[in-house]
Image (spheres, rainbow, N blue to C red):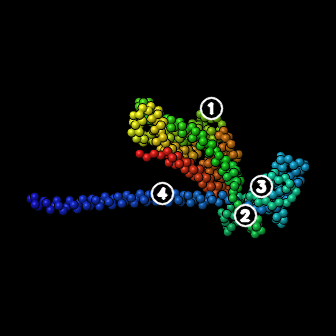
Amino acid sequence: MSEMAQPATGIKRPDLSQKRIRGRYAAERRFKLYGQLAVGLAIAMLAVLLISVCSKGYSAFYRTEIALDVMLDPAVITPDGKSDAETLGAADYQGLIKEALKTAFPDVTSRGDRKNLYNLVSNGAGNTVRQAVLANPSLIGSTQRFWVVAADDMDMLAKGFIKRDLPEGERVVSDTQIAWYDKLDESGQLRTAFNAVFFSAGDSREPEQAGILGALMGSIFTMLVTVLLALPLGVMSAIYLEEFAPKNRITEIIEVNINNLAAVPSIVFGLLGLAVLLGVFGLPRSAPLVGGMVLALMTLPTIIIATRAALKAVPPSIREAAYGIGASPLQVVSHHVLPLATPGIMTGAIIGLARALGESAPLLMIGMVAFIVDVPHGPTDPATVLPVQIYLWADSPERAFIEKTSAGIMVLLAFLISMNAIAIFVRRKFERRW
């Protein structure tokens, strides 16, 4: 009986174990393959997103300009013979642009055709002439060539976003305007130039005059207020709860509420800011100060949770060694634990601030969705932020605002990448290995 059982034990069990090993190896290969496919799919989706945004937004960084020979008529610029800055600045320079267009196209005589002719250039084209005259009043009385900004429709035509082969009724540019455009192009009066206005101006109803600077400065002031409030309060709260607070029912309730606040929808914090900061305390509406305070409240739970996790990750031997050489609890935390936890704290802080940078819902509740033309100079000035500005441009009907929307997203991504780069630098600088 025992001799008959031995062959079964010696043959079947090795085959079964080998089969199980092969199955485990196959499962491991499948798991690695799934992981590689997931990473590849994520990279592909990110690449599609970036390519889509960049392909639509890069054209906003340059603009079309038209050369016009403008007669700087003294009767228009200095009607009373005065040449002070106030008089020069108040002159009708847009009227001089229109006269230059009529001179360039003398065959255009009807009122309707002249209106279409004037639409070749931007409503703000006169500002170029105004700045030149203010800088050099001796130009008055002469004829000078100025490169002025083309209207948004002409700019879209030059960039190929308006198709010429469409029927005239299906495009915003008429055949006559296209003929005028071609005539200017043939005579060398068209060029492409860097769109400095996009980075130096605030918002505008005219796409060719709209810029990102107002929203960018609003985001910077808002994030400064958020950092100054959320980072120190969040870190100090986490240090107290993790290192000094007694473990009792009160601290347990506080910890549960902090974890719950991290999952509260952001618009709830906007309602809190609307009801308390604006309604009770009467703080200025649409100001980065209020926006930063609202975002600081929203970011605090994330920073506290991440900071506590970073403090827990410091090995207990560090604390024990510090206590062993006579350090006080405060010295243990400030001299040993906190420096080693700084990389993790910075990681959590940048995650919270990145979320705050991309938020728009709480800021809409406190009025930062208003149309703001002026660039803010401080945290109490009316302003908007980059996500809200992108939302406003995306809701505009003009075709030229589509490229502005994508360009705004590119600026927002660059801002976010810069913040992450700073956080990575700080983390690497303070990082310790044990």
Q: Which residue is mark 3?
A: 128
Residue under numbered circle 2: 191
Pair 4/3: label in front:
3
**Residue bearing the label numbered 1:** 281
Asked whether the residues under the numbered discs 2 and 3 touch, taking CB atoms below 8 Å apart as contact, a structural biologist would say: no
Dot 4 and dot 3 residues touching (CB under 8 Å): no
- Tell me, for residue 90, which label it has, or none: none
Please tell me whether mark 4 sits on a helix, a strand or a loop.
helix
Q: Nearer the viewer, mark 4 or mark 2?
A: 2
Q: Secondary structure at mark 3?
A: helix
Q: Where in the figure is residue 255, as x and y percent of width and height? A: 45, 35
**Which residue is found at the position 57% from the left and 50% from the top?**
418
* Residue displayed at 39% across by 34% down: 324
Residue 167, percent from left and from top: 69, 67
Name of the residue lying farthest toward the front: 325
Secondary element at tag 2? strand
Labels 4 and 2 touching (C-beta < 8 A): no
Three-letter amino acid code at the position of disc 2: Arg
Q: Secondary structure at mark 1?
A: loop
Q: Which of the numbered marks, if any, corresponds to residue 42?
A: 4
